[in-house]
Amino acid sequence: MGLFSADKALSDFVEKAYIRLLEAGYVINSEYIKEIPYGVTLKTGKSENALVSAAVYHTEKKGFSVVTTDPEIKSLLLSLITNVGTLGSDEAGKGDVFGPLVVCSFLLGKKEEVLLKLGAKDSKRMKNEEILSIYEKINADFRDSFSMVRIMPERYNSFYQNLSEQGKNLTDLLAWAHSKAISNVVEKRSDIKRVLVDKFTPSYSANARIIAAAGKVPVDFQVRAEQDPAVAIASVIARAGYLISLKQISETVLENKFSLIPGSGAESDKLLEDISALYGHDIFNKIAKTHFANFERLL
């Protein structure tokens, strides 16, 4: 049992947030601090006459999230979740039959703290429009803050085949992509204090490759690392890269006759059938990951 909540982790976070808000010159009306389902709500502002609501939520599965209409307060509270200097790394497209595999490493340094106001979270919990909008802002002004590694279908299939012949698999391909993205940022930024990777494997050799790519910077591997804003932003950039690539493939290879979709379920199976009827099977090497079980069902 904590001071603000029965959830000790949440209570400790709210206590830190309380102190940080006061240090930043905010007023907090203690009468409005209340425990709510999975969270704590409070009212704060620069003066008693300008208070706004802010709610902090926490669950073991989703971690911490902040909801408020004030971007300054949101940024301030989110900064408590991560450490400045964290290089987050995540991927997109791994479970999608169409399109590329995309890995992004993003550095949340001092100058990137302003991006916390954008409200980025795990891209799986965001709409495509939100993802693309946030990516547009980051890509315009923070190009040296991230590295995106896109493995387009033709290269992906060749890469995967070569690995399979060596007794390796997707884990090794992911390790290579994360290593490449991380080393690209390490080479151009000297303010990285730690690397945080969304854990995708317990494999020692795969993780060792990523650790080597980070050089002298310590590396952490965490399940559900998207709870950290640095990894969340990396997740958003990777997903944006994936969505943009889907559109490009639809326009160029498929001549806008079909619009490729994420996923690997029944809708993807139907789309594979329709594309096959018009173009034949050879085109799949250019638009999809051909080791997916969808192709066994198709054949």
Image (cartoon, rainbow, N blue to C red):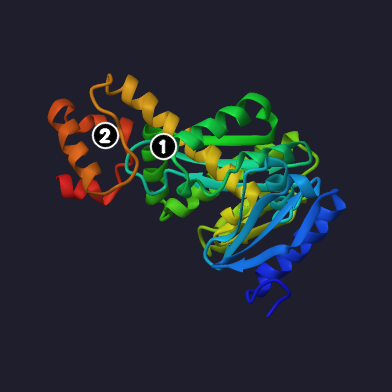
Q: Position of residue 236 (x, y in %)?
A: 53, 41
Q: Is residue 14 visible?
A: yes
C-alpha span from label 1 to label 2:
12 Å
Q: Position of residue 45 (x, y in %)?
A: 76, 48
Instruction: Look at label 1 and name its amino acid.
Output: Pro
Q: Which residue is pictured at 62% across the width and 51% down the height?
A: 210
Position of 21 compared to 92: left or right? right
Q: Position of residue 61 (x, y in %)?
A: 52, 65
Quadrant of the image containing the C terminus = top left
Q: Which residue is pictured at 62% across the width and 31% down the height?
A: 138
**Disc number for residue 151:** none
Position of 71 compared to 29: left or right? left
Q: Helix, strand or loop at disc 2? A: helix
In the image, 226 versus 158, the foreground residue is 226
Q: Earlier in the sequence, mark 1 or mark 2?
A: 1
Q: Which residue is mark 1?
A: 100
Q: Position of residue 146 (x, y in %)?
A: 64, 36
Position of 232 compared to 217: left or right? left
Is disc 1 surrounded by few (<14), some (14 to 19) or many (20+) residues within 10 Å? Answer: many
Q: Which residue is pictured at 37% across the width and 32% down the height?
A: 154
Among the 4 quarters of the image, the one containing residue 134: top right
**Disc number for residue 284:** 2
Is disc 2 surrounded by few (<14), some (14 to 19) or many (20+) residues within 10 Å? Answer: some
Extreme residue in the bottom direction: 1
Quadrant of the image containing the N terminus = bottom right
Q: Helix, strand or loop at disc 1? A: loop
Measured along the vertical axis of the image, is residue 28 above or below residue 270?
below
Instruction: Look at label 2 and name its amino acid.
Output: Phe
Extreme residue in the front direction: 49
